[in-house]
Amino acid sequence: MTTTARLKRAVPNERWQLILEFDDGQFRLFDTAILREEKGWDRLASPQHVKRYTVTPDAIGWPAAGTVDAQYLLRRSVPVTLAALEHEVLRLCYQNRAPTAQDQRHHVYEVAIACFSARPFRIGESIGGGHAERGGSSAFSLDEMLAWPAWREHFELAGCGWAIALVDTLAGEPERLLDALVLEACLRNGLPQADR
């Protein structure tokens, strides 16, 4: 393991982990529970705090807790392959639109991204909830999503109207688009629905 690797990117998933990409090509998984255990940063048990951080090549800092350097993250994380990251997602938005004609209580629209997948856009709908629910989800490449006529409507229904302008602006730069969506989703995480 190199001791001089610098951070290129840090993407949270929905399991209180960060997917770390280092500039030497390593991908590693860091469990933020380590920070609660070793440093006493209990505020990071809350999604609105653990997903709000800043990344530099040398460190990650959480306003609600503190900063750890890249070498600490490298030592305390575990290697992970790109194939294993295929289904690691970050939820951008989800919203229950019930009552609808399909269900009176549970009709949820969701948009998530899997930044390390060839088909990073995960668009889903859950109707009814629980066992044998109706709905489903699909994974799209950026081009596939843009070719789907209903993507903007689905984003709006999921509470992701804010993301439409980012997609429109950065569609020609897919990696930059994903980074911008991660940043904005993390900033909005934990905010009241009306403020998202």
Image: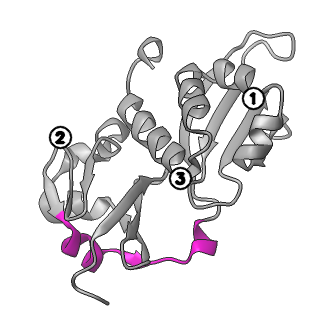
Q: Residue furthest bottom?
A: 1
- Residue 72's disc number: none
Q: Where is residue 16 in the image (x, y as percent from the top left)?
A: 40, 53
Where are the magenta residues, as a range?
A: 69-85
Q: Mark 1 points at which residue?
A: 151
Kind of residue at badge 1 = Trp
Which numbered disc, 1 or 3, marks the residue that appears first in the sequence?
A: 1
- To which quarter of the image does residue 147 belong? top right
In the picture of the structure, the residue carrying the numbered disc 2 is: 64
In the picture of the structure, the residue carrying the numbered disc 3 is 175
Predominant SS of the magenta segment: helix
Q: What residue type is labelled 2?
A: Ala
Residue 53's x, y, as percent?
27, 45
- Rounded to the nearest angstrom, the CA distance separating label 2 from label 1 is 35 Å
Q: Classify the position of the N terminus by image quarter.
A: bottom left
Residue at the spot 17% in from the left edge and 41% down from the top edge = 63
Q: In percent of the image, x 59 and y 33: which residue is there?
A: 167
> Residue drawn 75% across and 32% down?
126
Q: Report if residue 73 lies within the magenta region.
A: yes
Q: In this view, does 18 lie above or below 141?
A: below
Judge whether residue 114 is colored magenta: no
Q: Which colour scheme is used?
A: one colour
